[in-house]
Image (cartoon, rainbow, N blue to C red):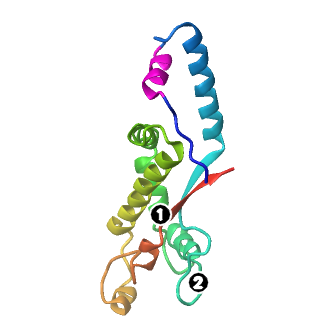
Amino acid sequence: MAKTAIKGMARLQATLNGKVQGVQKNWMARLLDRVLRRGAQMHLNAGFLEGASYPDGTPVAAVAYWNEFGTSRMPSRPFMRETIAKNQDQWPRLLAACLKQSGGDLEKALDMAAERIVAQIQEEIRTLQSPPLAPSTIKAKGFDKPLIDTGHMLNSVGYEVVND
């Protein structure tokens, strides 16, 4: 994937603050426009990606879906919806901090932000306790932690940065 970098971050910030005048202002406006267009072509996917499966071939995304929304035999344990509800307001600031830390490299910033979002999903999987497991499930597993049997789903949370 091609790398995109914002050169002259201080001047770009000054433009956004209205401090750059004349030719520099027009140049910075064009640069900002290019960066925004490039950013509109990129996005990240975080969660359970295509191809992740259990040893028996069951897609991890299917197991995550069954856990998230429940089945006729299992209650809903909405770890993805909870992750989004708890964290989505932070994600713009997270991306801004990652852009600053990466020196304006948009792809690197998206990678950095995605790693944090993956960690947030994994934390929600680790900490979810309700609804509790059925006594028969606890007996079969040998412990009472919802969403974790082997740790395969937890360890399968991933991300990809996509250039459209």
| Residue assigned mark 2 | 58
| Residue assigned mark 1 | 78
Specify the amino acid type for callout 2: Thr
Can the viewer see residue 85? yes
For this orientation, the residue located farthest to the bottom is 140
Compared with residue 1, is residue 154 higher up or lower down, i.e. above or below?
below
Residue 115's spot in the image, x, y percent?
43, 57
> Which numbered dot is residue 141?
none
Foreground residue among 22 and 127:
22
Q: Is residue 158 left or right of residue 133?
A: right
Tell me which secondary structure the magenta stretch mostly adopts.
Answer: helix
Residue 42's spot in the image, x, y percent?
62, 46
For this orientation, the residue located farthest to the right is 164
Specify the amino acid type for callout 1: Pro
Residue at the spot x=45%, y=42% of the render?
A: 95
Residue 91's spot in the image, x, y percent?
45, 43
Residue 122 falls within the magenta-colored stretch:
no
Residue at the spot x=43%, y=51% of the render?
A: 112
Q: Which residues are magenta?
A: 8-17
Q: To which quarter of the image does residue 49 belong?
A: bottom right
